[in-house]
């Protein structure tokens, strides 16, 4: 459970493994191979046993790819990882390329030799991305060749164990609805669409649909497996034998047939003549190819679990509230520690990270972190997805800012919170930027909006104060969050990029504007909030939605320039701090309680 600080990647991995991979490709009659970051389940956090990109290159980021040809190779990352990739991947072996701007298709179009056979693992590519890659290969005169066994797997001598954690029930106390009810409700909808069944490959969807959780994926309680939901509400659930207990069989009941993983392919082969729904954004090309071979009629469409999972019911929302109160008490104790011992100038990022984790462990309810904490002091705070290692560990120096982005997994909820604090005295510029970020955060918290509004329509509210000063940030403003599931989930988000999914009641989303000055400091203020029906507006003509803030912990008052806030903004921050004191005050004591009372007084 505890976060580790060793850097498992590094240039040495590429130097060691690239020649072996080329030898294996030659033996297989291939002139190249595509290595995506994705695993067979499209996980955000890839289990070590499936992190083939890290094995081949040394790169350990959460998004990327590589192409290995006979005489050259390239690694692809997005803007979050331009510094990390240079630290972890040998530039003598891999060219650095942009994952988003052109990506793998553009590279193959430019560099794939005519007549080259480029291998790929169909279980690791979405059908849409594969089509783009195929078109690029065709343009270069190369040929894409599917492999039945990934060549990396055949030569990975020290491969970590394949995840095999037991799948356990998640009680209805937390889920708010029984698994049978969910299955029949979604099965009826399938039948209404004219489909006979849907193949579900997303571990988060399986966890939600069957009211189970697992331990196969770091930071997210997911079981790795697949499912086939039929229109009559019955289902086939494919799990490795070692994950299944008698308790699980009893929990799932007679309408769910638990089958070994190796029965998945024969089951798909038996769907000839059936109308089968499949989500191209979560299911790999392999599923489409298998169903096509079987003679099934494939219906492309969104995984039917995605939207119900995103719109939390009353029990899930109440559980999330309780988790945030518990987590808020731990974070408030930590902020008191930062305001006292953390001001010495001697504390380092790793110690600061470990101290927060210890406060969460003290709750006796923490199941895991919801992601590896981002503990960024000074210039490291300006690296949006920074992860501290023993090599990069930096002191929280006086006269700097410290950014801590963290979260916990509890049985009743998942948390994600970012706070930025001053170590010593902050500069006027730091306070100005912090206040602008706060103004954007408040705007997104206070907004009322009509049904049908999407996240990208609200995104500018969080940026307006920064834009007025010619500033901005390059990440999204909000992502969906699960309930004892993933800290990042769709289909909703708040970002500049167009998203067609409207925000609906019950959706939990983060509110996290920021500002980052490269080489100097980073600022981010993040709370989670849930979409709720808004109170009636006098004279209003349409029902409106709004947000209820779930996260409860002080926002650094010493960084706020009061005169920059409007009356409404001032009322918001004072009201928020009053709620923090009301909910969290009874849960802390001693010096931490005295500090919290002062930290939440009206400005």
Image (cartoon, rainbow, N blue to C red):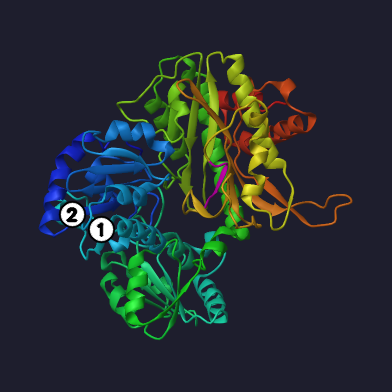
Query: How many C-alpha atoms fall within 10 Å of the one at disc 1: few (<14), some, or many (≥20)?
Result: many
Query: How many C-alpha atoms fall within 10 Å of the one at disc 2: few (<14), some, or many (≥20)?
Result: many
Please, which residue is most extreme toward the bottom here?
273
Q: Position of residue 87 (x, y in %)?
A: 30, 31
Taking the spot 35% from the left edge, 65% from the top edge, the residue there is: 285
> Which residues are drawn in magenta?
476-482
Taking the spot 72% from the left edge, 23% from the top edge, the residue there is: 564
Q: Position of residue 8 (x, y in %)?
A: 26, 38
**Rendered view: 77 above or below 396:** below
Q: Quadrant of residue 313?
A: bottom right
Q: Quadrant of residue 585?
A: top right
Q: Nearer the viewer, mark 1 or mark 2?
A: 1
Taking the spot 24% from the left edge, 42% from the top edge, the residue there is: 57
Q: Position of residue 9 (x, y in %)?
A: 26, 38
Q: Is 522 positioned to the left or the right of 154 in the image?
A: right
Residue 142 numbered tag: 1
Residue 295 numbered tag: none
Q: Is 503 positioned to the left or the right of 108 in the image?
A: right
Residue 581 seen by the camera: no
The residue tagged with tag 1: helix, strand or loop?
Answer: loop
Image quadrant holding the N terminus, namely top left
Foreground of the two, 418 or 414: 418
Q: Is 202 positioned to the left or the right of 511 in the image?
A: left
Q: Position of residue 592 (x, y in %)?
A: 56, 26
Q: Are marks 1 and 2 in contact (CB under 8 Å)?
A: yes
Q: Is 247 positioned to the left or the right of 445 in the image?
A: left
Taking the spot 56% from the left edge, 64% from the top edge, the residue there is: 308
Whether the magenta-drawn stretch holds residue 493 is answered as no
Q: Which residue is mark 2?
A: 31
Whether the magenta-drawn stretch holds residue 481 is answered as yes
């Amino acid at each position: 459970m505890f976060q580790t600080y060793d850097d498992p990647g590094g240039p040495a991995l590429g130097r060691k493994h690239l020649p072996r991979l080329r030898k294996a490709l030659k033996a297989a009659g291939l002139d190249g191979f595509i290595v995506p970051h994705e695993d067979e389940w499209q996980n955000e956090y890839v289990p070590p046993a499936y992190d083939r990109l890290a094995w081949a290159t040394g790169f350990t980021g959460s998004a990327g790819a590589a192409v290995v040809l006979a005489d050259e190779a390239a690694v692809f990352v997005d803007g979050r990882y331009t510094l990390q990739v240079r630290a972890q991947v040998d530039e003598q072996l891999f060219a650095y390329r942009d994952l988003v701007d052109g990506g793998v298709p553009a590279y193959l179009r430019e560099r794939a030799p005519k007549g080259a056979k480029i291998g790929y693992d169909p279980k690791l590519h979405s059908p849409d991305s594969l089509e783009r890659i195929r078109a690029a290969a065709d343009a270069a005169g190369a040929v894409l060749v599917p492999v039945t066994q990934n060549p990396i797997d055949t030569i990975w001598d020290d491969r970590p164990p394949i995840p095999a954690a037991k799948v356990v029930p998640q009680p209805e106390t937390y889920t708010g609805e029984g698994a049978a009810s969910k299955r029949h409700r979604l099965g009826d909808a399938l039948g209404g669409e004219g489909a006979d069944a849907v193949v579900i490959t997303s571990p988060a969807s399986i966890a939600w649909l069957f009211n189970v959780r697992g331990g196969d994926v770091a930071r997210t309680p997911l079981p790795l497996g697949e499912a086939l939901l039929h229109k009559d509400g019955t289902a086939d659930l494919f799990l490795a034998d070692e994950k299944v207990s008698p308790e699980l069989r009893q929990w799932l009941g007679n309408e769910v047939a638990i089958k070994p993983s190796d029965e998945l392919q024969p089951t798909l082969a038996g769907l000839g003549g059936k109308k089968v729904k499949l989500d191209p954004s979560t299911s790999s090309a392999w599923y489409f190819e298998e169903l096509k071979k079987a003679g099934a009629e494939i219906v492309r469409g969104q995984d039917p679990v995605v939207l119900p999972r995103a719109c939390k019911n009353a029990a899930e929302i109440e559980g999330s509230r309780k988790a945030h109160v518990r987590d808020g008490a731990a974070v408030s104790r930590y902020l008191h520690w930062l305001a006292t011992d953390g001001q010495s100038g001697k504390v380092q990022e790793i110690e600061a990270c470990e101290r927060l984790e210890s406060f969460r462990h003290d709750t006796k309810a923490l199941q895991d972190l919801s992601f590896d904490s981002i503990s960024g002091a000074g210039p490291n705070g300006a690296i949006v997805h920074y992860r501290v290692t023993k090599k990069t560990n930096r002191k929280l120096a006086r006269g700097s800012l410290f950014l801590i982005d963290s979260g916990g997994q509890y049985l009743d909820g998942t948390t994600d919170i970012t706070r930025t604090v001053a170590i010593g005295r902050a500069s006027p510029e730091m306070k100005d930027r912090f206040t602008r970020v706060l103004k954007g955060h408040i705007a997104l918290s206070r907004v009322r909006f009509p049904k049908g509004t999407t996240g990208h329509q609200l995104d500018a509210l969080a940026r307006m104060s920064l834009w007025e000063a010619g500033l901005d940030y390059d990440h999204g403003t909000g992502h969906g969050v699960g309930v004892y599931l993933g800290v990042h989930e769709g289909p909703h988000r708040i970002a500049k990029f167009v998203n067609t999914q409207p925000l609906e009641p019950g959706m939990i989303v983060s509110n996290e504007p920021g500002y980052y000055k490269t080489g100097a400091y980073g600022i981010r203020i993040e709370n989670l909030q849930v979409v709720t029906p808004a109170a009636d507006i006098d004279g209003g003509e349409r029902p409106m939605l709004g947000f209820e803030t779930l996260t409860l912990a002080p926002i650094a008052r010493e960084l706020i320039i009061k005169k920059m806030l409007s009356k409404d903004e001032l009322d918001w921050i004072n009201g928020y701090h009053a709620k923090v004191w009301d909910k969290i005050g009874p849960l802390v004591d001693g010096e931490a309680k005295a500090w919290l009372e002062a930290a939440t007084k009206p400005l």
